[in-house]
Amino acid sequence: MKFSRQLAVSSLAVIVLAACSSDPNTRREAKDDFNYLDAPPLESWTLPEDATPQFYPNYEIPKGDYSGGIGREVDIRPPQQVLELIPGARVERQGSDVTLWLLQKDEMDKVWSTVKTMLAEINVKARKETDDFIETDWVSWVSEDEDVEIGSRYEISRFEANNRYGFKMKLIDWREGGKDKPVTRVNEERYNTLMTNLVTARYDRDLREEAALRAQELVKSIPISMGTDRSGLPVIIARTPYNVMWQEIPELLPKMGFTIEERNQSQGTAKAKYAAPDDAFWNDVGLKPIDLEPGDYTFLFGDLGNRTSINVTDKDGKPVAENLLRSLEPLISTVIKKD
């Protein structure tokens, strides 16, 4: 799907499983034939007068007045799931409507602010709006598994109940190819979920950006010093959690003269090639050039809880000399502070 007010759900990592065919119909319909629709109706069994019928209930079809599509009317696309990207939120479905429940008012305020930001970004205006309610104008969806452009309008509301804070998405109008039509239950559920996912994905993006900014602020004040690992061997100690330190490696090492060739966060390794910076660099950082030969090195980062250990090995996997490690310690500290 894409949007200009035509929403790009794929960009939000909302994965829709679909057949490889370019025909939208075959993406929604079963690939086999529908000969079963021509099957003769079922008839009651005729038993001899003295026979005692025996039936197993395992495959008994419950009795009732059931309605729904058959044949080509059956939509085989997997149902959409609300992306659980808002920490602590619980999803509740009421019919086709989607409600997210949060425990704190400030979280709901952030979600509500995200709704307004998201609507502005996709250029969808509000027909009605209060502090706790928005009725949207038409949202247009273009999808590979739809024959025509889809239009939908929503009521978005927030409220408080039982010491919880709810955010509700409700589809209220539907059109296909520019013509108003009644919406099927499947499409109502599907496009309520897709619209909710636009909000949750935008909220998650904001959280990640805030976390990245906080991490940058933390990195600026990371104390760097020499220390020892659990085996008593010399290592550089960064007094910050491993996940914070790891985020800085792509920028930190290149500014020290290392070209990163491979990284593995789970193993805590970064393989890099060293080329000594020029004199202007050393004058800028105010340090003497380190006595490190150009070549391949591997940085080893260890998780020590609220600290991170840093060690370096040469191309043969042997730790560099302690004096070289000690010369790297002020360089790392200076580069971090300059950033």
Image (cartoon, helix red, strand yellow):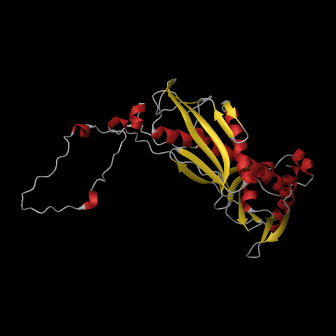
Asked if residue 212 lies left or right of residue 147, the reply is: right
Identity of the residue drawn at 72% across and 56% down: 246
- Image coords of residue 103 (percent x, y): 68, 57
Q: In the image, is residue 147 above or below residue 281?
A: above
Front-most of residues 215 and 55: 55
Question: Looking at the figure, which quarter contains the N terminus?
Answer: top right
Q: In the image, is residue 149 above or below residue 91?
A: above
Identity of the residue drawn at 20% across and 61% down: 55
Identity of the residue drawn at 52% across and 43% down: 15
Q: Quadrant of residue 271?
A: bottom right
Asked if residue 39 lies left or right of residue 84, the reply is: left
Front-most of residues 321 and 45: 45
Q: Is residue 290 visible?
A: no
Q: In the image, is residue 125 above or below residue 54?
A: above
Q: Going by the picture, which residue comes out furthest to the top?
A: 178
Q: Is residue 166 visible?
A: yes
Front-most of residues 210 and 50: 50
- Image coords of residue 297 (percent x, y): 71, 57
- Image coords of residue 333 (percent x, y): 86, 57
- Image coords of residue 62 (percent x, y): 31, 53
Asked if residue 260 lies left or right of residue 188, the reply is: right
Identity of the residue drawn at 80% across and 48% down: 255
Front-most of residues 48 and 100: 48
Q: Count every numbered label the image shows and give the total.
A: 0
